[in-house]
Image (spheres, grey):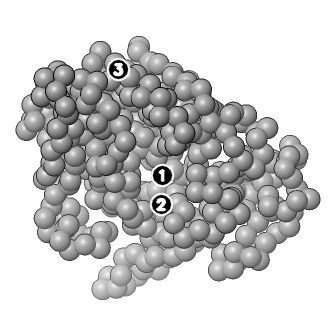
Amino acid sequence: MAEPVRDLLAVPQDFTTGRIDIASGVARLSATLWATRWRDPDADPDTAVIIVHPTSNFMGHYALKLLAERGVAAIGMATRYVGNDSTLITENCLLDIGAVVRHTREVLGYRRVLLVGNSGGGSLTALYQSQAEHPTITSTPAGDPPDLTVNRLPQLDAITLAMAHPGRARVYTDSLDPSIRNENDPFDRDPELDMFRKENGPPYSPDFLTRYRAAQEDRNRRITAWVRVQLARLAEDPNGPDDIPFVVHGTAADPRFLDLTLDPSDRVSNTILGDPWKTNFLPARLGHYSSLRSWLSQWSIDDSHSDAVKHLPRVSVPVQVIFGTADNAVFPSHAEAMYAAITSERKELITLKGADHYFRTTPDLRDEMCDHIARWALSA
């Protein structure tokens, strides 16, 4: 095979929703999504793999060149919300994926298209194909466009959930610090619900975990209730703003980060960003900033549509799930729950023994993952 070559793809997309949810005026006016394609000129001209995440810039994804070397065209895309989840609307991400899938088939001419949802892209991928096959979403949780029963999404030939979790709202809630009593002061803490207090663990008792998980969901729902009150208040003034931002403190407080007896695996006691206590307050951590509408679409445990376990039973195409046993962002129960939810005739669960979330120390396992993805794509 020849050395893979890289192309820059400009994919037309309509951002005119009537609401400004990306800051760049240039991006809005250009009405363009950007993607990178790696391809071997001598390889199968019919098969393309698209890798997606809600906010990560996958134009430089580590798997692109590796997949191209394995005989498939590999496209790493960025949604309109690249690098910023503060105003992200999940349903708009589906439109962005649909634009790239349509471009891949109709403009680039690929007959088989596989979507790979990596990390936070896993639930997005499951939701996408669910809505492509059986559209049910007529609005965002805040009642805004798009209507996916009208904006029909082009279907895929297969999907892969790689090092992926079941959904942002679920893992976010599992990491939401329930000991925070004052939303404006992260250090006003309930000692009885503080996983970082040595008296509570690790290891954590079953009683503590039961109270802890319930309190996490309670906090998520309290924020959601506050969000809905604020939206109702804004709606009273038709000439005023229809959305506002707010801060959520404490978003890296999953007991599994410290207690390795919970959801046991080969992982180390840590988060992918480092020490859990520091990461809990780190501005770059998921979901510290949100608009009201984005909260409902992305982080609300009761409102977000992005739930792979819920939507995988609605998917009929082949589904592949890949996870690493040393991943400290995605746990074994995540992969097992998603795999159990699949009802399509072809499904596959791949376990990469010793792989962490980014394959930092295991490039051989990164290569193995790409072997599995290329094989799955070529057999779709």
Residue 239 in the figure: left or right of residue 165: left
Nearest the camera: 304 or 212?
212
Q: Residue at x 92, y 59 (%)?
A: 199
Residue to which mark 3 is pinned? 376
Residue reaching furthest to the right: 199
Rendered view: 361 above or below 72: below
How far across and how far down the image is residue 361, in percent?
A: 54, 39
Q: Residue at x 55, y 24 (%)?
A: 351
The answer to whether the residue labelled 1 contacts the one labelled 2, judged by CB atoms less than 8 Å apart, is yes
How far across and how far down the image is residue 21, in percent?
A: 31, 69
Q: Which mark is residue 304?
A: 1
User: Please, what secondary structure does the residue beneath circle 1 have?
Assistant: loop
Q: Residue at x 47, y 80 (%)?
A: 233
User: Please, what secondary structure does the residue beneath circle 2 have?
Assistant: helix
Residue 138 in view of the camera: no
How far across and how far down the image is residue 298, in percent?
A: 46, 56
Nearest the camera: 347 or 314?
347
Residue to which mark 2 is pinned? 296
